[in-house]
Image: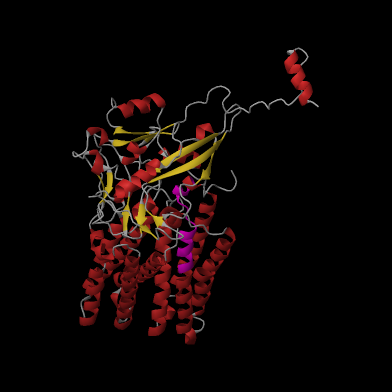
Amino acid sequence: MRPAFSVIFFTVMSGCGYGLLFLLGAVFVSDPLLIARNEALLALAIGAVFVVVGLLSSTLHLGQPQRAWRAFSQWRTSWLSREGVASLASFVPMLALAWCLWRGADESLLRALGALLALLAAITIVCTAGIYTSLKTIPAWHNPYVLPGYLLLGLLGGACWSLLIGGWAGTAQARPALVVAFAIACVVLKRAYWRHIDSEAPTSTPESATGLGRFGRVRSVEAPHTEENYLTQEMGFVLARQHAARLRTICLVLIGAVPIVAAAAVPELPGWSAVLACIAAFAATAGLFVERWLFFAQAKHVVMLYYGGTRPQNP
Amino acid sequence: MTSLAPSTAKKLGLVIDLDICVGCHACAVACKEWNDGGEFGPLPDADPYGAEPLGVWFNRVHSYEVEPTQKNQPAMTVHFPRSCLHCETPDCVTVCPTGASYKRAEDGIVLVDEDKCIGCKLCSWACPYGAREYSEVRGVMQKCTLCVDRIYNESFEEVDRQPACVMACPTRARHFGDLGDPDSTVSKLVAERGGYDLMPEMGYKPVNKYLPPRPRRDGCGSTPKPTSDEKTDFSTASPLLRWIDKVLSR
């Protein structure tokens, strides 16, 4: 699948934003006094900016962005529509929480708003993943690794950015364990996901696509068109295998090794906590971009079977 | 609304005979021509007269070589028109966030309301058959309408109320009708010839059916004997032929 930058930017930014908002909501649920008012407001603002920037970027992917409001209507069947509704709904606890923090409110209200924020943040990420996991036509997306992947990678992004906010507020020492835990979980999950997509036997073949398997082996001899068309441009994107292996390593270093080392060093070098948190946050975000690019670039669409494009190398 | 009706009584669709399709692309051209001026049109191309023209076609004709895997099976070339199959349970409709994609309850035709489409392209990702193509020029998704603006068009003679691709086919490899009615001509044709679904494992229950190539006749496809270039024996031939042989052999 063609890795469209607007979609990659959207899923990475909104993933980080909702990861951060989920963690903030979870802090309020456990104890609203655990976090200083200014730090909480900053986390809310950064989370909201990430989400808004992501949503705006996603409209760049549309052919008719002025009609984007219509996308809130089909939540009964469409994960894309559900994502839009959930994401819009999350602004209610976001703004309410900001208002309450600004004006001061009692503990139980903060706790309730935090719970609602965490819930809607999680639901939005689940809906984002649902868009991809629901597509039977793309086996690399239609598998049980994708939903936990979106959740964990969002939480990793959120944890790294909350570490950075803590670095600014001088409370970074409180949270490095979270970054280490999420980074380890992400590395394990991504490796399992890649092993899965590399080894999975295809469910559809050129023979089942044409129904001619009973007569023998089917090979495309002439495409319907000499130039590219929408299908070959959008779904025929092929990434060279040797580049994929290198990019996977880069991804694991950026989302795994760098944040783990940086976060683990925070309690050891308290004077450097802001710098270390900065390194962790920017490395993890860059790693998420590489991960999301690979998520698209390595996904093969069954329609390419008609073009003879994606037959497995070893029959 | 993108929720699907439980089932439609009428299932309008096409039956495509791979035994007699000659791969002339007349169906694809007739489709483009009709739909460019049809109710859902136009179908504008980007860079139409330039080096890399790019535009929407609802119908694409592939050609495949079928290499036999068993002995005594001939190799075959099969021309294969590919278009929307108007599936009974299509995900392209249910994934649509705006309700622009819909399947008509009255006849099962899958359509796009191009005034509601936001061009998110998700429906084209959901279709395994490549039936939906995005128009860069118009910013919306476009697809086969089963010529809904022809088949119910009362200003046409009854014989002309057929999709443009069916009308254009010079070998009559394309048939249009109600596949929900077991007594219709198309349903009988499917039953008689063993019409089948493409990628049934996807579970979208295509309405359109494909008729397989018929078994090849005896000897057809086997390697012909090389013509002999040995010397012909003229000893028993007529004197005239013997004389001609003698002259030519000099």
Residue pushed farthest bottom?
Answer: A271
Residue pushed farthest left?
Answer: B154
Rendered position, A29 above or below B62: below
Position of B209 compared to A199: left or right?
left
- Residue B82: which quarter of the image? top left
What residue is drawn where x is 68% and y is 26%? B227
- Residue A97: which quarter of the image? bottom left
Majority secondary structure of magenta residues: helix
The x, y position of residue A23, in whole percent, is 35, 70
Rendered position, A141 above or below B182: below
Residue A30 visible in this rendered orientation of the protein: no
Colour theme: secondary structure
Q: Nearer the viewer, residue B21 or B120?
A: B21
Q: Nearer the viewer, residue A68 or A220?
A: A220
Residue B4 visible in this rendered orientation of the protein: yes
Magenta stretch: includes residue A299: yes
Which quadrant: the C terminus of chain B? top right
Rendered position, B109 above or below A116: above
Q: Nearer the viewer, residue A187 or A35?
A: A187
Magenta stretch: includes residue A42: no
Magenta range is A289-305
Q: Nearer the viewer, residue A32 or B38?
A: B38
Position of B106 compared to B146: left or right?
left
Rendered position, A51 above or below A270: above
The x, y position of residue A270, in whole percent, is 48, 85
Position of A144 compared to A115: left or right?
right
What residue is drawn where x is 53% and y is 59%? A239
Q: How many marks?
A: 0
What residue is drawn where x is 42% and y is 41%? B81
The x, y position of residue A184, in whole percent, is 50, 66
The x, y position of residue A151, in whole percent, is 39, 62
What residue is drawn where x is 42% and y is 42%? B25
